[in-house]
Amino acid sequence: MAARFGASPAQVYATKVRYLIGALIAVIAVLLILIVVVANNNSGTQDVLVNDPAAVQAAVPLSQNVDVLVANVRIEQGTQLMPHLFVDQSYSPDRVPAGAILARDKANVMGKFAKNMVNANFPIMLEDVTESAGGSFIDNIPPGYRAVTITVDARSGVEGWARPGTRVDILLTYTDKKSGEKAVVTLVSFTQVLSVAGMTASDQGNKQPVSAQGTTVTLMVTEKDSKRIELARTMGTLSLSLRSSRGGPDDEPSDRPVIIKPGNIISDQEDAPEVEPAEGVLYRMNPKTGRQDKYVLRRGRWSLDTEE
């Protein structure tokens, strides 16, 4: 009966087995194709991360610190950026200032120039870097400032160490009209040297020589200070005091001049007169009796104590 209407049970079973095996082979083929596709996608992603620094940064966990380029000395405007001016400092990602130059990008800024002054221990920003040193220092004088020139010798010019780009104080030594005493006052503080003997920062090396006959120094000061300096030249002698290149809390302009006179060269504490106590006891030898007499201080007067 089965042979009349179709295949035998054995043939039906064999057909089912063939269908099952074919289905398994198809599933395995699909799985192999999926594995190949996923592998290719992963490889492409790795290539992007390797070749794209931004992608690498995005892939870094937020908990990992970032090295930022920080100035280890004060960098004046127009200074050529060199490796010895910087250190790498670690920052947490949420504390990195916007626009800060990362340490890994150091090579991209070396050899360029500082567009603005960068204080020591502060990160250098993209806006602080320029491709060239710019024109003459005249082009870099901010509004409200003036360039003034004074004459110094080897001593008053700090032996030539007050060179272009450094910060100095201008001191005035004069004679006080009331007391007739010599006095020294800081006329202008934290001003920048623009040139020495006509040479700017880009013209000179480490130390600027000072002529024995005197050398001119051009400084950048406010309009008000330029008038003070011009008047001070008629009152006494101007000299320079060199400020630290590293900068610090005291390296800021000050409008409170301190006048030093011979009477306060020594500290006020050492010069202050002794103040007698309100009460006290003093023993003094009596030449007539050869004995010690006791004196008592009461209400500001010493008197012999006759109670003993």
Image (cartoon, rainbow, N blue to C red):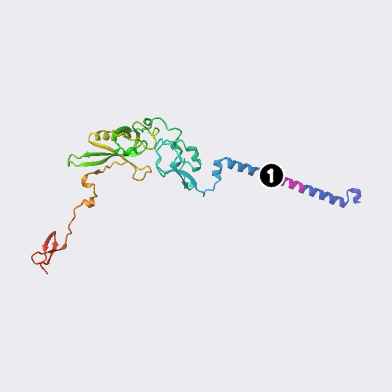
Name the residue nearer the viewer: 16 or 119: 119
Which of the 4 image quadrants contains residue 289?
Answer: bottom left
> Which residue: 58% across, 40% down?
51
Name the residue nearer the viewer: 212 or 246: 212
Q: Which residues are magenta?
A: 24-34
Q: Residues within 10 Å of mark 1 (few under 14, many from 20)?
A: few
| Residue 224 relative to residue 120: left or right | left
| Residue 126 relative to residue 248: left or right | right
Residue 207, how many percent across, how many down? Answer: 37, 37
Name the residue nearer the viewer: 216 or 278: 216
Residue 184, how many percent across, how many down? Answer: 24, 41
> Which residue: 21% across, 41% down?
182
Q: Is residue 30 magenta?
A: yes
Q: Amino acid at mark 1?
A: Val
How many marks the image carries: the answer is 1
| Residue 53 relative to residue 71: left or right | right
Q: Quadrant of the C terminus?
A: bottom left
Residue 41, how many percent across, how many down? Answer: 64, 43
| Residue closest to the far bottom | 308
Main secondary structure of the magenta stretch: helix
Q: Is residue 287 magenta?
A: no
Residue identifier under label 1? 36
Residue 51 visible in rendering:
yes
> Which residue: 22% across, 47% down?
264
Residue 179, how many percent across, how many down? Answer: 17, 42
In the displayed structure, 277 sits above or below 259; it is: below
| Residue 254 relative to residue 109: left or right | left
